[in-house]
Amino acid sequence: MRQLSFAFCIICSITGHLSIAQAFEKQVDFDRDVRPILIQKCILCHGPGRQESGYRIDRFKDLSGMGDSQRQAIVLGNALKSHLYQRVSSLDPDIRMPPNGDGLNRLQLDTIARWINLGAKRSNTVVTNQKTDHWSFQQIRRPQPPRPKKTDRLINEVDYFTQTKLETRGLSLAESTNANTLIRRVYLVMLGLQPTPEEVTQFVSDPSEIAYERLIERVLASPQYGERWAQHWLDCVRYAESTGYEINRSIPNIFPYRDYVIRSFNSDLPYDRFLREQIAGDQVEQDAATGFLVTGPHDTNPSPDPRLTAMQFQDGHDEIIKTVSAVTMGLTLGCARCHDHKFDPLSQQDYYRLQAIFAGVSYGTRAEQGPEFDQMQQEAAALKPNIDRLEQVAYQLQETNALSQPIHPREYEETFAPFTTDRVRFEIYHTNDGLTPELDDVEIWTVAEENAPSINIAHRDRGATATSSPTAMGNQGKSADLLLDGSRQLLLYYKAADKTDVWFEIKLARRHKIDRITIKPRGRAVPVDYQIKSPGENGEWSTIVDSRTRYPHISDSRTTETMRLANLSEEQISAIVDNTKSRRELAQRVERLTRGPQIYTGKFHTPRDTFLMKGGDPQKPAELMDPGFISVLGRLDIDGNTLEADRRLALANAITDSDNPLTARVISNRIWQHYFGTGIVDTPSDFGVNGSAPTHPLLLDWLAGFLIDNKWSLKDLHRLLLRSATFRQTSHTDERAFAIDSQTRLLWRFPPQRLEAEVLRDTMLRASGRLNLRQFGKPFKFFEESSSQFADRIPLKQFNQEGWRRMIYGEKIRLTTVGVFGVFDCPDASQMTPKRAISTSAVQALALYNSGFVNRHARFMAEAVGNKLPSDLTAQVRTSFMRTLSRPPTSSELDVIMPLIKEDGLESLGRILFNLNEFVFLN
Amino acid sequence: MRNQLLNRRSFLGESQFGLAGIALASLLSSEGVLADGSVEYDPTAPFQARQPHFKAHAKNVIVVFCAGAVSHVDFWEYKPELVKYHGKPLPGNERLISFQGENGALQKPLWNFSAKGECGKMLSDIVPHIGDCADDICFLHSVHTKSSTHGPGENLMSTGFNREGYPGMGAWVSYGLGTANQDLPAFVAIEDPRGTPQSGPNNWSSGFLPAAFQGTSFSTTKPIRYLTPPPNNVPQQNTRTLDILNTLNELHRQDFKTDTELSARISSYELAAKLQLSVPDVTRIQSEPEHIHTLYGTDSKNNIKADFARNCILARRLVEKGVRFVQLFNGAYASGGKLNWDTHNNMPELVPGHAEALDQPLAGLIKDLKQRDLLKETLVICCTEFGRMPMFQVGNDGRDHNPEGFTIWMAGGGVKGGFSYGATDPFGYKAEQNPLSVHDVHATILHLLGLDHTRLTYYHNGLQRRLTDVHGHVIKEVMS
């Protein structure tokens, strides 16, 4: 041991001498000279794991900032004033850092001092291990575009990077593609639609740079741009209009989020603001934006089992955490739910700190603030006096007709003169809403006596039993015994099978003297017309309670025909019915207005406490967690007392801080991917150690820097990419290049890509002339309305004008596959799909070749083309090609096609065109 | 029947490149880019049969999924203590709250148990035909699961995760092994004619695997979508159209000779043509002889039974033709215990109908496979999403969901017959002896197919994913 340390010292001193020599020659290099000292002496107490005295050195911002001492750690150019240097160089053992063991030696002190005096030039953040060393956690570099050898085809900075990389493999950018292909490519990438034949003709006749610039501006200004790029975003967040899981209930009012995303892309909302609004848009009157948080699948099956409910909460929040971390920063934080991340510097604490940020968020609807909301509140206020007036009338009617108080739909009492009995019978004739009667509980109370307080003897623990007319055969038991369980249960309550001849009878264990009965209805299906009977002391059945002496409750929807009230004429009853109806309708209207326009964008409430769950098991809470950020990326100035919205705001700001090394890289990469099929990082929502390495790391950083410098304008990024020669290359293959780079990752050509399901459908509709470009609003249906929420969803076979809108406006139901196009790897929104799988199957061929949809639109196209050009068959073929492939047919193609058209008609050409590889691929 | 899609020329034959070789050539693999998954396959022929990791016991799998949760204490696991303590509360859990609420007293099995087969296995008399097969069956009595709701429970049983969007067992297996018959899908899901199970297509989803590995859903009553051309097309017209489609595709391909996706699309039309012939053929179960129909019970007056019997025959015909994985559903969605096994009330009336529908057809399937000598290479699994409580629910004659312990059984395919493994506690509530997770069952199924569950992986959102998540132990004890 001793020998080893001795040997170590020798090595140290040798390297030390070398450093001295270097130090005089060059400037101090942070990575080479300073970093090792910090790692050796400081990191254990001031790193990502621990931050003694609130001071932390693994991020440059923190390293030079202030800890709890409130003194600047690094004063640029002045080591003596820098707290960091003061502490490490102090001769006072109580002040000197590190507190234990050897301090910094003279050489090390000298290095730190010189580094600060020379301006404390930053470089990469300090790193501690393989996990934090990972490239994506380092600051975004600002590289100069490199200088490739061959420059004749280069247009902008993008090309300088791609060409340089290609040259390392002896490759080069390819020549530009032809004008037909280029305009089609621009349209498909930017709008998800092909250009019209007229647009093609115009561009082909003048494919100048100016014309191309105009084309770029045209697609960027098109309303369809937002739809195309919103689809990519919605894939990432797995937007859907049903909850998923076995209930899979439709969510009819989440579409405002979809529309928000489309509008944001169209208006070029700066990307950092786009993210902030999606996390905390409720704070800036962008309520629809927070739909982002609640787009994940969630289990809404209600159960009284606390274990299940706890699991549902954890699962629901897991979706939120995964969405936020993966979509915005490419972090797979979901992996840290049960244990520290295996590959990335993400701890289980990080996971639950984020859970604490969202601890006050739940799945559900809330009012969208704005002019509509304000308008509704004004209307509600204006209606208030009318309610008061009607209440007054009701009060008078009750008084003049000598009726008693209405029932209460959740709990009320019937009292009567004391008597002794062992059985009580309810006969129910009508409910408030006309549904078959339901009740949670009935309690029968004894008369209180000295030493014997009143007790409920209608309880099964006291030997009571119940019989009844037939009860409902729902999924759950609904028998009359459930009236006697002494508790309200979510699913276990009494429900009759019928609406007429309904009765139940409670038999007590023995005879009791009773004087009141508590009735606990369920708010709905409340018995309002009933009698309670009992054999009294003499054994004769008599009516002890008759509901007809009560004034009707406001929820009572009986008509003059069905309403029965004691000793009242039809006329008197009619007046009461009218008043009740008016009051109810008005109250409902006011309630609806007061609620405001409800949209499914999450509910916010006071956060519950968050605990780290051992092994991710909701039954094993460990320490209480404060809200906070992912520690490797920094700290938030919030704690357990921070208000709900402020927690989300703090997180949103940290994610969109221009110092965050991930956010700008991740979105730049996503945009790149949707041009070239594959991102610079091929795992677009995983920038961690297990994700794939960037093919063009410098280019990615340059793009991220470009985005930040251009105020996070995505349209500026689009202009850059669209102008590049890299984008405008031919997609034709090259066998030599292919042998070197079969996946075209280095972009020696524009990589051909199979179109997504949505683009296939939309382009087919545009070709047939039936595409309806109406934007926004309620989705159109892919499935028939279903009677049971559980039953199979039957695909619609025919669509009309409404169903010919772009597919992004089609109702997205989880756990289903949309007919024809679903099989083209269209995700069902269960999992985040930042990159779609591309597969080829016979089922796809069947769908495109045989389906009614495709063949119908082939016919529509033939009709449209035929009507325009009734006599010229060749011109019809030509136009069909232009509508589908954006180019005229070649003569050899015409030779093949014309005989077929003459035999089978133009319609069969549409079928062929819609099935062609050239139609199904972006070239 | 005339083949309407089949191409006269084989365009793939002209390819000058070894397509498989090209697909795997990747410049970047040397630069640390992860392959998508552990299985190397030719994307132009994703179903080509592949070698397992080690010698397989079974070649094919038929999973019979009893949707809605079968009561293990009434059918498979005999609990004398439950009879003895009938009417008493469950010791230690007197007021247990489960999925729907409070439970009442212990309830003895609703039907008698008696010794079956040479092994003398105690089984319920309500499934006498399955009882006849007792010597071929291996019971796993100690399975437990993570969720007490049907959807997540089904998800876990079929995909290894209670969440949605993960590949089904059949998708993993066809990804790992391909299939023997290129004219039929590798993975077929046969739904109950009464409807889709609770988790619907998520049970046979390809999840994040390429969609090609998704289960294809069809049955004797429900055809494959778009299998036939639109009604107004005459066959000659179809063929002409396809010829020209191929010619134009071939002209287009001249500039893209290296692109396998384009060739794959061209050949997918050929595969589609084969499906058009093979699927109607395999679903034509009328061609089976009389004694086979009698064996399965297709002549039953109980329509549900007759339908299930026909689907059992279809399952056998599929594996006989080399289909790798069949998932056969017995039961549909939540319906008050009418359309599936979810019997929270009225068990004495509802369950006999379900039992009758399951019993003879499933036993017929095992017997038929055996007489054809197919049982030894076909693994038959009878599973469900969770068990049911040993108590009736309060105020009710039905049992609530029980994720703590239940029974799955297997037959053939390399498992011991007449064998039982694991047990719940004396009342049938919690798995107690050799508890088994669903992941253990999955690991075992893969093992029987010659696949190491830790090596069958696919990259998705940060991880090389597996059917068994990060869990699973092969149950060596059950192997013959």
Image (cartoon, rainbow, N blue to C red):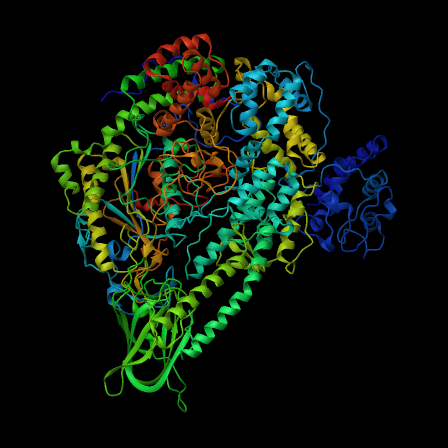
Please name the residue shown 83% across and 39% down the image.
A119
Residue A546: where, in percent of width, then height?
33, 77
Q: Nearer the viewer, residue A19 or A523?
A: A523
Residue most extreme to the bottom: A450
Label total for image: 0
Residue at the far front: name it: A571
User: In the rendered image of this protein, does residue B408 appear above or below residue A908?
Assistant: below
The reply to whether residue B32 is visible in this rendering is no
Quadrant for residue B452, please give it: top left
Identify the residue shown where x is 73% and y is 26%: A144
Q: Is residue A311 above or below residue A77?
A: below
Horizontal arrangement in the rendering, residue A736 relative to residue B232 (left or right): right
Report the front residue among A79 and A408.
Answer: A408
Query: Relative to A441, does residue A821 appear above or below in the rendering?
Result: above
**Left or right: B466 with respect to A339?**
left
Q: Residue A15 at what x, y percent from top left?
A: 77, 35
Instruction: Report x, y in % for residue B17.
Output: 44, 15
Where residue A691 sits, quadrant-wise, is top right
- The image quadrant where one finds the N terminus of chain A is top right
Name the quadrant containing residue A559: bottom left
Residue A225 seen from this side: yes
Q: Residue A582: x and y, percent? A: 45, 64
- In this image, A70 relative to A785: left or right? right
